[in-house]
Structures are given as C-alpha cells and as structure tokens.
C-alpha cells in the first residue's frame, strides 16, 4: 500500500531535549516536505526536499533541521525544542512538484 | 503564489451536491488550482486540480471560470464522511516558489443527515 509513515504519532518532551520525527515513503517519490499546523494559522511549510541531498527552507524553518540522505526518508530534527514548537506536524511526498501530494498521519508534539 | 479566498464554513444535506467556491482573482496564467481536504486533524488528502478546463474524477468535479478568477469544487452526492476542511490552493509549478503549498484557512464543510 502506498503510504507516508511518520513516527512517533504522539510525543511529549521537555524544552531543550533534542528529538527527531521520522518520515518514510514507499512510493519512490522525489519530492518531500514538512508542515506544521496550528489553530488559526493553518498548515505552514517548514522545509522541503526536491531530491536526495537537496533541501530548502519553507516559510517557518527556524528551530528545525532536516536531512535527505536517502530518497525514502526525510527526518525532521528539533535540536533544542521550545514550547512554541508544540504543534501538529505532517510529512508529505509527491512524485514531482505539482502532482498529487500524499500526507502522513501526523505527529502531535508537545514541548513543556 | 496567488492568494485564495474561501468562505469559512458551509453546510450541506447528505445526498445533495456540495458546491464549495474559491476566489483567486490574482491568479496568473501558469498557476494551477488545487483542492485538498482534511478530516479532523488527519493528513490532508488530495482531491483534484486543474489549469483552465473543468476536471472530474471519482471524488469531485472542478469548475474553473473562463477568466480563471474563481473556481468551484463540486461533491455531487455529499455523505457524512465528506465533513472536513476543504482547501483551495493556487500554485505555480515552476519558479522561485517551486515546492510550496499555501493552504490558507479553508472552508469547514459540515454534511448533516
């Protein structure tokens, strides 16, 4: 089954403790991206990747890092999480920019 | 990418057609109109997209006006499972904003029995 898998689905952590949210897709898609969703602000893009080793900032990249060492994986790294990064995070992939994007189930992160 | 304007909320009776409007008056000639929906904090789901011709697939129809300044997503026979937030997105497929999807606030569609 074609899918985008995020882990974990839920995470509660403390300020400053590094964490990684993983994202994996099984569709051999070139394009992957991360979004955060906050009440009243909608979905905002954090980072995206056009292909392996090619990444670029979205609209809200501050406090986040990403890497794309393999085509299928696109982890989101929070080196020093802060409470304002409490949010619902989504990973997405598509075969190329402009085609249908598939989204993961989401990761609900709480930073206390 | 051009901005879009959608109503905040709409209601529809089950079994009836749901017509969701979207204004994109600043759209340029090479920008596509996309529709996604999000059911209660799940990942957004692609519905349909088009450039200037009307499009139809198994989920919905997309009607784009001739001047391309607005469009309507039609769910021909709405069901309770269609209750969701619907996002209209206008998107360049090349250029400096390549790769970005701007979701906006969307329209909360509620389908009632």
Image (cartoon, rainbow, N blue to C red):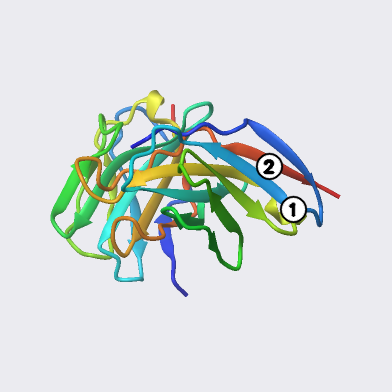
> Is residue A27 toward the left or the right of residue A63 in the image?
right
> Is residue A38 toward the left or the right of residue B94 in the image?
right
**Is residue A110 at all visible to an observer of this figure?**
no
Q: Looking at the picture, how far across and down is residue A57, in whole percent?
A: 22, 38
Please name the residue that numbered disc 2 is placed on: B109
The residue located at (25%, 63%) in the rendering is A30
Instruction: Find the residue positioned furthest to the left.
Output: A53
Instruction: Find the residue positioned furthest to the front.
Output: B66
Q: For the residues carrying marks 2 and 1, which lies nearer the camera in this image? A: 1
Name the quarter where the N terminus of chain B is drawn.
top left
Q: Looking at the picture, how far across and down is residue B88, in whole percent?
A: 50, 43
Q: Chain of mark 2?
A: B
Circle 1 SS class: loop
The residue located at (62%, 30%) in the rendering is B8
Q: Chain of mark 1?
A: B
Please name the residue that numbered disc 1 is placed on: B17
Q: Looking at the picture, how far across and down is residue B77, in whole percent?
A: 75, 59
The residues tagged by marks 2 and 1 sit, at their Cα atoms, a distance apart of 12 Å
The residue located at (31%, 48%) in the rendering is B30
Q: Residues within 10 Å of mark 2 (few under 14, many from 20)?
A: many
Same chain letter for marks 2 and 1: yes
**Is residue B111 at all visible to an observer of this figure?**
yes
Instruction: Find the residue positioned furthest to the bottom.
Output: A1
Task: In this rendered view, identify the residue nearer to me: A19 or A87.
Answer: A87
Q: Earlier in the sequence, mark 2 or mark 1?
A: 1
**Above or below B98: residue A110:** above
Q: Quadrant of residue B86?
A: top right
> Is residue B14 toward the left or the right of residue A48 in the image?
right
Circle 2 SS class: strand
Is the C-beta separation of discs 2 and 1 under 8 Å? Answer: no
Which mark identifies residue B110? none
Q: Looking at the picture, how far across and down is residue A44, in whole percent?
A: 39, 36
């Amino acid at each position: 089954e074609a899918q985008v898998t995020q882990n974990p689905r839920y995470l509660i952590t403390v300020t400053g403790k590094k964490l990684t949210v993983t994202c994996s897709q099984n569709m051999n898609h070139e394009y992957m991206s991360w979004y955060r969703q906050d009440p009243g602000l909608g979905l905002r893009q954090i980072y995206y990747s056009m292909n392996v080793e090619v990444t670029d900032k979205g609209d809200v990249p501050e406090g986040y890092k990403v890497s794309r060492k393999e085509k299928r994986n696109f982890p989101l790294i929070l080196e020093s999480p802060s409470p304002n990064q409490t949010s619902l995070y989504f990973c997405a992939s598509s075969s190329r920019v402009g085609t249908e994007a598939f989204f993961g189930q989401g990761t609900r992160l709480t930073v206390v | 990418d051009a901005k879009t304007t959608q109503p905040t909320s709409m209601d529809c009776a089950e079994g009836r057609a749901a017509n969701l409007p979207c204004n994109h008056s600043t759209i340029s000639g090479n920008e596509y109109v996309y529709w996604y929906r999000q059911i209660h904090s799940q990942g957004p789901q692609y519905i349909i997209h088009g450039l200037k011709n009307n499009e139809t697939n198994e989920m919905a129809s997309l009607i784009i006006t001739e001047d391309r300044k607005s469009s309507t997503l039609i769910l021909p026979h709405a069901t309770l499972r269609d209750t969701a937030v619907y996002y209209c997105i206008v998107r360049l497929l090349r250029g400096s904003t390549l790769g970005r999807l701007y979701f906006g606030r969307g329209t909360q569609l509620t389908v009632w029995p």
